[in-house]
Image (cartoon, rainbow, N blue to C red):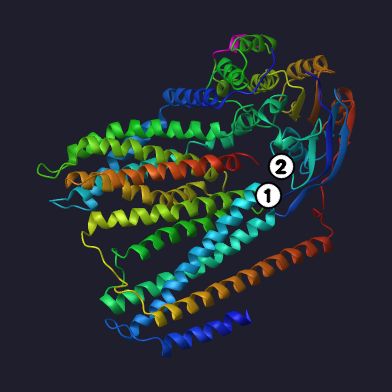
C-alpha cells in the first residue's frame, strides 16, 4: 500500500464560537513525517482529528490523495489509522481480544493479533483486560491496534505522553522502522523529539 | 408582515360578525376558527422544520439548520396557543378542561411534548456542527411521530373510551368554510412573517457577534 | 494481506458479540434492569392500588415498567464508546457506520428480552387472583414487536444523548415522548386480545412504528455517530 499525499486547504475550526484553528494550509508529500508543534489550546488535536477524518472542519478541507478525509469510503478509510489521548481500547476486553476485534473490523484474519502482540512485546499480558494494563503497556497496545491494519497514513496525538524512557525508545524505534512506508503526522510539545523524528515541522499558535 | 396583519383583522371581523353561529354551540363555537387554523399552521411549520432539517443533513449548510430551528420555534409557539385554545373550547362546550377522548388535541399534545424536548436538546449541546446535526436528526424523527401519534391516539380511544366523539357534527356551511380558510391563510402569513423576522434577527445577532470578535482582535472563520 | 471493507452483517455480528461478551463479564446493566423491573412493579402497585384492575392497568403497568427500565439501558450503552473514544475506532474502521447503530439496537433488544424474562412472570405473580389475565401469546407477540421499536429508537437516542451535557436528564426527555405511540399501540394489543377483539390493528401500528422509526434511525444514525 502506498503512502498518500496529504493536503490541508484553509482548514479552520471553532468550538461554540471560539476559533481554535484558522486558515491552515499545508501539503505533505507521500511518505514524509510531519510534526505538529504548539502549546495546549493551539488546535493540534483538532487538526489531527480533521486529518484522520474524524472531524469535519468548519472551514476548508483536508485531502488524502485528493479525496476529502471525512468522506473517504470504507475501503479507503482502512488506510488511515489514528491513536489519540484516549487509548481507543475496550477496557473490559483482554489485550488479545482488542486486537482480534480490530482485525475483524478491518477484514483481517485473527491470527494477526498474535503477531501484533509479539511485535509490541505484550505476549505476557495478552490475556489481561486492557483496563488492567499499565500506562506504558496500554499505550503500546493502542499503537499496536493502530498499526495492525498496516495503515498508509498514521495520525498520532502525543504518542509519547505518559511513557517511561524504555517505552519511548521502543516507540521511536518503531516509528523509525515504519518511515518511508507511511505518511505520518504526529503532535508533540517537545521540540527536541520532534526535530529528531520528523522531516517537517508545523508550528501552531493559540489564536487570540 | 403588513399583509398578515391586514388579513388577521379581516378574519377576526369575519369570525366575530359574519359567520353564522353554530346551531348547537352558538357564539362560543367561533373559537373553532382560531383553534383549528392555528393547529394546522403549527403542523405546517413543524413540517417545514423537518424539511430544512433533512436538507441540512444532506448539504450541511448551517443556514438550513437555522431555518429549521426557527420554523420549529414558530410551530411550538403556535402549539402553545393550540393547547390554550383547545381546553377553552372543551370547557365552554363540554364543561371540562381536558378531554382525553379528543383525538386531535391529544395527538397534538404528544407531538408538542416531543418538540419541547427538541429545545432541551438544542440547549444541551454547544453551538456548532454537532448541535446542528443533532437538532436536525430530532426534527426529522419528529415528523415521523405525527402519523404514529395520530394512529396511537386513535387506538387509545379503543382502550379507555369505547364511544367515539364527533366534534364537527354536520359538514360546514360554505360561509363557515370560507371564514375558516381566511383565518388559516392569515395565520400562515403571520407565522411566515414571524419566521422571516426571527431568521433575520438571528442572522443579525450572529453578524454582531462576529464583528465584536473582530473588534476584540479574536480570530473568526470565513 | 491488506485491510478491506467489512460488510454490514459481519460488522454487526462482531460488535454485538463484543457488547454481549462485555455484559456477560460485568452484567451490571442486565442486573440493574431486572431489579428495576421488580422494584417498579411494586411501586406501581402501591401507587395505583386497584383491587379489581382492568387489563389495561395490569398490562399497562408492565409496559410502563419496561419502558422505564429501557431508559437505564439507553442511558448507558453508548457512554463507553463516547468516553473512552471507542467511537473513534469504530468510525475509522472500514465498516458501514450504520452497523454501529444496528449493533447497539440489537444489544438493547437482548437486554430487553433478558429483563422481560424477569418482569413478565413477576407481573403475573403480582396480579390479584381474580384479575383478568391478558392472553400470554398476544402479550409475547406485542413484546417482541415492541422491543424492536424501543431498541431502534433507544440506540439512536443513546448515540445522541451520550454526547450532550447532562445526558442523564436528556435521555428520558428525548426518549419517552418518542416512545409513547409505541406504548399505546403495544398496550392496545393486550387489551384488545383480552376483550376478544382482533389485535391486527394495534399490532400493525406497532410494526409500523418499528418500520418508520427503524428506517428514520437507519437513515440518520451516521450523522449522530460522526463529527
Q: Nearer the viewer, residue B10 or A4?
A: B10
Have a look at marks 2 and 1 and say if they share a chain.
no
Range shown magenta: A122-127
Nearer to us of marks 2 and 1 is 1
Q: Quadrant of the N terminus of chain A?
A: top right
Badges 2 and 1: C-beta atoms under 8 Å apart?
A: yes
Q: Is residue A194 depicted above or below B75 in this figure?
A: above
Residue beneath the point at 54% across and 32% down = C100
Q: Is residue C190 depicted above or below B23 in this figure?
A: above
Q: Pinpoint the chain carrying mark 1.
A: B
Q: Is residue C24 left or right of residue B192?
A: left
In the rendered image, residue A83, in percent from the top left (x then y), is placed at: 70, 28
The residue that label 1 is drawn on is B60
C-alpha separation, residue under disc 2 versus residue under disc 1 = 10 Å
Q: Nearer the viewer, residue A168 or A152?
A: A152
In the rendered image, residue A37, in percent from the top left (x then y), is placed at: 84, 35
SS at mark 2?
loop
Q: Residue A136, located in which quarter of the rendered image?
A: top right
The residue that label 2 is drawn on is A56
Amino acid at each position: 500500500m502506498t503512502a498518500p499525499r496529504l493536503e490541508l486547504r484553509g482548514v479552520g475550526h471553532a468550538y461554540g464560537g471560539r476559533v481554535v484553528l484558522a486558515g491552515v494550509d499545508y501539503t505533505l508529500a507521500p511518505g514524509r513525517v510531519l510534526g505538529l508543534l504548539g502549546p495546549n489550546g493551539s488546535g493540534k488535536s483538532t487538526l489531527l482529528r480533521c486529518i484522520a477524518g474524524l472531524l469535519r472542519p468548519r472551514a476548508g478541507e483536508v485531502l488524502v490523495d485528493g479525496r476529502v478525509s471525512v468522506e473517504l469510503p470504507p475501503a479507503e478509510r482502512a488506510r488511515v489509522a489514528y491513536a489519540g489521548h484516549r487509548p481507543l481500547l475496550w477496557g473490559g476486553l483482554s489485550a488479545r481480544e482488542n486486537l482480534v476485534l480490530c482485525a475483524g473490523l478491518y477484514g483481517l484474519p485473527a491470527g494477526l493479533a498474535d503477531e501484533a502482540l509479539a511485535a509490541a512485546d505484550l505476549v505476557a499480558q495478552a490475556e489481561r483486560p486492557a483496563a488492567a494494563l499499565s500506562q506504558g503497556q496500554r499505550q503500546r497496545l493502542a499503537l499496536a491496534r493502530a498499526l495492525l491494519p498496516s495503515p498508509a497514513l498514521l495520525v498520532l496525538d502525543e504518542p509519547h505522553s505518559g511513557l517511561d524512557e524504555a517505552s519511548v525508545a521502543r516507540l521511536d524505534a518503531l516509528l523509525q522502522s515504519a518511515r518511508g512506508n507511511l505518511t505520518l503526522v504526529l503532535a508533540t510539545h517537545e521540540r527536541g523529539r520532534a526535530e529528531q523524528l520528523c522531516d517537517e515541522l508545523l508550528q501552531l499558535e493559540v489564536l487570540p | 408582515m403588513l399583509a398578515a396583519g391586514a388579513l388577521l383583522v379581516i378574519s377576526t371581523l369575519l369570525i366575530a360578525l359574519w359567520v353564522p353561529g353554530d346551531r348547537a354551540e352558538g357564539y362560543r363555537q367561533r373559537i373553532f376558527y382560531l383553534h383549528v387554523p392555528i393547529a394546522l399552521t403549527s403542523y405546517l411549520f413543524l413540517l417545514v422544520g423537518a424539511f430544512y432539517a433533512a436538507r441540512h443533513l444532506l448539504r450541511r449548510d448551517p443556514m438550513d439548520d437555522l431555518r429549521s430551528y426557527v420554523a420549529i420555534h414558530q410551530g411550538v409557539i403556535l402549539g402553545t396557543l393550540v393547547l390554550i385554545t383547545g381546553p377553552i373550547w372543551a370547557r365552554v362546550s363540554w364543561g371540562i378542561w381536558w378531554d382525553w377522548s379528543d383525538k386531535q388535541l391529544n395527538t397534538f399534545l404528544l407531538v408538542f411534548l416531543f418538540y419541547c424536548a427538541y429545545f432541551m436538546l438544542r440547549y444541551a449541546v454547544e453551538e456548532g456542527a454537532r448541535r446542528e446535526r443533532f437538532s436536525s436528526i430530532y426534527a426529522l424523527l419528529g415528523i415521523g411521530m405525527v402519523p404514529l401519534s395520530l394512529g396511537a391516539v386513535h387506538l387509545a380511544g379503543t382502550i379507555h373510551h369505547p364511544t367515539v366523539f364527533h366534534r364537527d357534527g354536520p359538514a360546514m356551511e360554505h360561509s363557515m368554510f370560507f371564514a375558516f380558510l381566511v383565518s388559516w391563510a392569515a395565520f400562515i402569513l403571520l407565522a411566515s412573517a414571524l419566521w422571516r423576522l426571527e431568521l433575520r434577527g438571528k442572522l443579525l445577532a450572529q453578524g454582531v457577534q462576529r464583528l465584536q470578535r473582530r473588534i476584540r482582535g479574536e480570530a473568526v472563520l470565513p | 494481506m491488506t485491510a478491506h471493507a467489512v460488510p454490514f452483517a459481519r460488522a454487526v455480528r462482531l460488535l454485538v458479540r463484543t457488547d454481549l461478551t462485555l455484559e456477560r463479564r460485568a452484567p451490571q446493566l442486565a442486573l440493574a434492569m431486572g431489579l428495576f423491573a421488580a422494584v417498579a412493579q411494586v411501586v406501581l402497585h402501591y401507587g395505583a392500588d386497584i383491587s379489581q384492575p382492568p387489563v389495561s392497568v395490569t398490562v399497562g403497568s408492565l409496559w410502563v415498567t419496561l419502558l422505564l427500565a429501557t431508559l437505564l439501558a439507553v442511558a448507558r450503552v453508548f457512554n463507553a464508546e463516547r468516553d473512552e473514544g471507542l467511537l473513534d475506532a469504530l468510525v475509522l474502521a472500514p465498516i458501514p457506520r450504520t452497523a454501529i447503530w444496528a449493533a447497539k439496537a440489537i444489544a438493547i433488544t437482548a437486554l430487553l428480552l433478558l429483563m422481560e424474562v424477569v418482569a413478565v412472570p413477576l407481573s403475573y405473580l403480582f396480579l390479584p387472583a381474580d384479575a383478568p389475565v391478558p392472553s400470554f401469546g398476544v402479550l409475547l407477540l406485542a413484546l417482541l414487536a415492541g422491543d424492536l421499536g424501543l431498541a431502534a429508537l433507544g440506540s439512536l437516542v443513546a448515540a445522541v444523548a451520550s454526547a450532550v451535557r447532562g445526558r442523564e436528564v436528556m435521555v428520558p426527555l428525548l426518549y419517552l415522548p418518542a416512545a409513547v405511540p409505541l406504548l399505546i399501540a403495544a398496550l392496545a394489543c393486550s387489551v384488545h386480545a383480552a376483550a376478544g377483539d382482533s389485535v391486527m390493528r394495534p399490532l400493525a401500528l406497532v410494526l409500523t412504528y418499528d418500520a418508520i422509526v427503524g428506517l428514520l434511525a437507519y437513515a440518520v444514525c451516521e450523522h449522530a455517530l460522526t463529527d
